[in-house]
Amino acid sequence: MRTIAPLALLVVLVPVIFAGIAVPAGESGQTGKMEIREVFDDVQRGISQANVAIFSAHLHSQVRVTLHGGETGLYSANQAYYLLQTFLHDRTPVSFAFTTFGESDNTPYGTGNAAFTFRGIRQHAQIYVALASEGGRWVITHINIY
Amino acid sequence: MAGYFSSLRASLTRARIPPAAAAVAALLMLLGISHAVHSGLVSSYENRWDRVSEEQCRANLSLAIARFSQEQQSLRRLVEDLAASPEVHAFFLNKGSDRTPLFERLAQLSRDEGVGIDVYDGGGELTAWEGTGGPVTSGDLARALGGRLFTFVVRTPVSSLLMIGVPIRIAGTVRGVGVIRRTIDSSAPLNNPLLRQEAVDEQLSRELGASVEFSFAGEGETANDSRYCSGPMYGLDSTFLGTVSVLRPARIVFLDGLGNVFRKIDAGLSVLILLFAGWAVARPLASVRSYPLRAFLITVLIWSIRYALLWLDVPSGFLSGGAFDPGLFASKFGFGLAKSIGELTITTVVLSLNVALAVRLWLRKPASTPSVGRIPLPARLVSALGATLLLFWILRGYAAAIRSGVFDSGLTYFDARVLLPSPGLVLMVFNFFLLGACTIIAAIALALAVARWCTPREGGKVSAPGWLAAAGLFAAGAVVFGLLGGTPLTSTVYRLLFGFGVLLAAWGYLKLSAAGEIFGLRHYVLFVLAGAVIMLYPLLDGYVHEKDRGRVEMFAAEELKPVDGWLKHVVEEGLQGFENDAYRERLSEGDAEGVTGIAFERWSSSLACSQGYDAMFTVIDPDGREASRFVIGSSIAGMTEADTALPLTSQTIIRVRNFGTGINALKVYAGSMPILGSDGVVLGHVRVVVAAGQQALFRGETPTILRGSSEARLESFYRRVTLSEYRDGVLLTSNNPLVPIARPLPEPVNEAFTDSTRASLWASDEIDGDRYETFFVRRGPTGIVSLGLKELGATWHIVGLVKLAAGWAFIALVLISWWRILRWRRGVPYRLTFRDRLLIALLVTAIIPLTFVAFYARVYEGEQQMETLEQQLDEETQGVIYNITEHPEQGVTVPAFPDTPLKAEELASDIGTDFNIYTDNLLRVSSRPTLYDVGILDPRLSGNVYAKIVLGGKRFVIQTEKIGSVEYSVGYRPILDANQNIIGVVSVPTLFRSEESEEQAGRRNALLLGTYAAVLLLVIVIAAAFASRIAAPVQKLTEATRKVAKGDLDVHVPHAGAEGEISELIRAFDQMTHDLRRNREDLVRYERELAWKEMAKQVAHEIKNPLTPMRLSIQHLRRTYLDGAEHFGEILDSVTKTVIEQIDTLSRIASEFSHFARMPRRNLDRLDVGRVIEEAVRLFSQESSVMFDLRIRDGIPPIVADREELRRALINIIRNGIQAMDGTGSILIQSSSEGGGVSISVTDFGKGVPADMLDKLFMPNFSTKTDGMGLGLAIVRKTVEDLHGTVTLKSEEGKGTTVSVWLPAADPEGAGPA
């Protein structure tokens, strides 16, 4: 038993560590087909409550993120999650609602104005979120807070 | 201090309080104090906030004013230093001297200090200049020539310049004036590289943590603002320049800042508490006897600390950006264990420590473990199957980690454009190595287990059928794992190779262990790390390739069409940004100068700028005139057309216009909006135009260096994308000039697209001899668009491999150094082996010349590149001059300069290069005028160029120029008339060509680095092979000498591979060992005979002793019998008793001699010495009058010995001690790790041994006692020496005796000092 136990410990430990890393970009479980409006509602709720987890399941494996005074570029869903979470952690949302919805070339998008408090100062930003259909569900491909 | 800690430690020891627990208590107390102080400060600040705010603001204001004053003084000093320079002296003292050195001096000063500087002579004439200029009046110059300073501030559209005029005195006489300028205030944000040269107000804002604004005379908008506290700024000549205003700290921000400081203190204290608590818990855990339980508990402890750090947000909460930036890498694994590269590094280091600990415990486990052979074979086979699948699952985890490292990061792994990898990349690769090493170790452990479980015979030894069965299981597992569903993330071939590799490693390990050559730590770690590199490269390369392909597909799917919604949003954002009170104020004031910079300011902070779109921002006054405009990009004509076509209405309107078709398509999004004052009056209109062209795949075309955003862009490939469009199977157009005109679509592709359902495909393509991985996608009924990525050549892969190998070498070096330091601290002297020395000598000899060659090749290559650029710019300037001049007849040159920027832009577009034309040292026209318009570039001809061309008569000049943080080359050429007089200067900048030069650098690096890296690798391999071959016989000889020193004379050094003197040395050595062996055998034989003689004499003596009383007794019995003694019965009884006693004595003597002569066969095993001591002591438990004091230290390494024999030796020593105390007293038994082994000492406090007897105590048959044979200590010595140990005895008469035994550890490497 003594021979096996440290071995067992070793072989259990390493997979446990790897287990989560083993969920790379694009491997999030299927959440079923979502209505476009529901995705936008989740985004609206998530941004209003400064909680990215509310809509992170809708993020595409590669998301274009543009944040005013922050990061801009193409990021994986995991990176986008932390970037948005950090951005919203630094700013307290005061109000946000989508005011315009549209569609171009099967790309639904929504825009709206948001207000944040950043270091005691009120800031305004325009938010643009675009979706795309992938594998029978609508996913967020573009988030712009500028 | 050390004394204080010593006494504190002593006090704690007396009070039986562990120091770690005391530290935890003290830190908890500090945490409480920190909370109390924070609450107290918050309450105090809140109660007197107005005063605090005012004090803070005033303090910041004083600092800002002082800093402004320092800035002026530093500029003044620069001019005074210049005035003292030989160039200035030469110019002013030798009239008519060459001004070139002075211009060069100014150019250097301007470049180094980021200033603009002019030098005027005594007549007020500008004689030399460099950098941005400014208006200086004759009055200013007259004042300075009169010996006084002057200071004033000049406003440009985007910034304010502080200008200081300083008299140039030579020998006490004012000879001229130096005017210096520096940017002190910028109205545009700093997110654009063009503006990264930080202005003074930005520096101050950063230093003070509060917004600082300068208001110069006539602009006092913040002076009366209650949100600011303001103070006056004076020039060096005491002129009032304006006011500096510092934003009052907001209460919430101030208290948040305070809270952040305390949060950091609390987190720091919490980390310390955690570490001390961990230490406090770890000590008792280390003494847990059960190895698996100890490993488990320590594992739980380690990961508890890791998660506690995550919960405390340490170190992420302290450090943001860099390695902790999620933009660089982020994974959601393990609740944040890998949320950045920094956190991942901590996690992998913790994992590695954990694995190292498990391995250490495994290697040191007792050998006397129950055999798994008792488990039935079917059960073992099932376990082996499970372990096999587990192995491949671990491999999958590793592959997933690498995949995440590629897909969840913005790192470019194989980018040959940069020679030195970024710190983020180095850290990530380090993590990959550690994860690879952990995977290999776990896999080897599993392979050993599987092979053992597969062995049919009972017992722990792995047999050949076991290995074969394990290999079969691994092969089957590699295939089955891919069929189980899910994503295996590795190919079957990769899994097979990995499985067999670890099996081979496990087999090798057992072989070496069995031969007593268990891997040294250094070799083991290097082996595992080398394995980590080998298994990393194919995976990393594969995933990078997969990501590239995915991005091309995404590019094709999303970017071939402009996303109207998004681009409209970009325009909308551009327009809405004008809804700003500051802009309204400037527009309502109607000050033309104040309005001029608005367009640039808005653009520089807009989404259009950050995304790099071609854009045009225009402000139109209420009269319909253009008040401010900024244009950037190459689609100016289309944007101008869309801009002018847009009506100015009272509504916000956005329109889309299309220009061109196919891949020449350009979509222009234009919007206009009125700007209304607070009273509803129209203050003007603004227009924003954004262009997106198919050639740039509808993305921004502005070069990356000019964008205000990071580089993680979809189109940022390290290989250029070749975009081509085919119609009806024939090339229509391409952005790659190497693609032949009317090229047919590759036949296999054409054929594949005859299937009307096919939308896209990947195919290999060849263009001008180069191979491309190309993605073909259907567009319309007859159109095909292709996106080709140039295939990476062998040199590119070599560069990637070399970078990984360099990383591996670095980590190996660190680990070897660490191991060396550990050994050095344990007292093992640092010593390089012969092979090490030889290898180092060979490598140094080979690498030094190679490095020199590589260095000079790189310098030469750089020079070649510069020459190429020079030649290119030379030709381009000639081309521009050819196009801007006319030659009505032979030898006559007439200028025909474009008279508007638009014409210049059209010409630039025709000839394919940007240009500027200077006449009378001033910019006359530019094909890219916007940067001049907003004051970022100086419209004056560079002073240095003026000196070289106009004064020096050079026909071509190339120089490096700088805007903000952007450096670029510019070529200048004079425009000459028929008489060779200079009528102007033309310049060609490379500002917008940075991507081309990066690509060239990549190719150059790949070729150069790849070649040298291959040579270097070859040199290392050959040197290592030579060193090993030459050093191998010496190493074997050294090893053999060590064995001889330990008494093993049966060694034989093979001659194979040895030549010359070394071969002779080996032969001599073998002869020597042979002679020694024969001598020793003779000696042993002689000693044995001597011993037998001694033994026989002693036996005879000992036997004679009881025989005498027996003889006397029996004679006495016979005599009494013959005499008919009256009490014969009693005498008989007495005599027989005596005889029996003597017979018993004889029997005991026989028994002891027998015992000494014939020891039972040893059963060697790995033993825990502490446990054996406890067992020996337990046998004396009936000795109620003896007290045993056992002091057995932690961490004693196991030894190899016969349990019974060792116990018997200890019993002998202990019994002697008890007897020396006459059965009453205490025995002290101590054991600890010492000198690579274990020491055991047994001390009695009896009567001791006289000094003259000490030498004889270990001799057989010597005894100080009246009973016994005196063989006890002899047996002890024989036992200990047979185990290669030592035994010593110290005694003092009347005080006691200590017998000390030292035995070597089973694994001397791991045995530490006491």
Image (cartoon, helix red, strand yellow):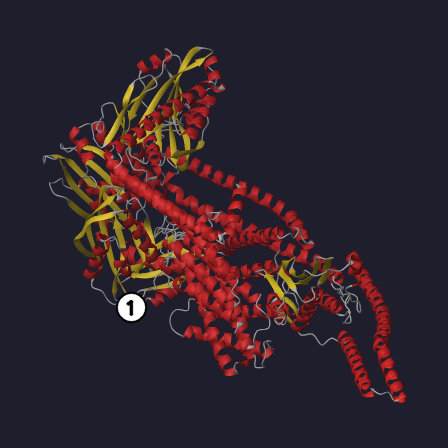
Identify the chain of the residue marked 1, using the numbered disc in the image.
B
Is any atom of residue A140 visible in this view?
A: yes
Secondary structure of the residue carrying numbered label 1: loop
Q: Which quarter of the rendered picture does the C terminus of chain B lie within?
A: bottom right
* Left or right, B202 with reference to B496: left
The x and y percentages for residue B1050 are 77, 67
How packed mark 1 is, by other alpha carbons closer than 10 Å (few <14, some 14-19, many 20 or more), is few
The part of the image, by quadrant, that contains residue B213 is top left
The x and y percentages for residue A24 are 37, 62
Is any atom of residue B933 visible in this view?
A: no
The residue located at (46%, 73%) in the rendering is: B389
The x and y percentages for residue B24 are 43, 51
* Left or right, B338 with reference to B646: right
Look at the picture and state if B112 lies above or below B373.
Answer: above
Look at the picture and state if B374 lies above or below B631.
Answer: below
Seen from the viewer's position, the closer of residues A143 and B950 is A143
Look at the picture and state if B896 lies above or below B140.
Answer: below
**Amino acid marked by disc 1:** Ser
- The residue singled out by tag 1 in the image is B756
The x and y percentages for residue B50 are 23, 33
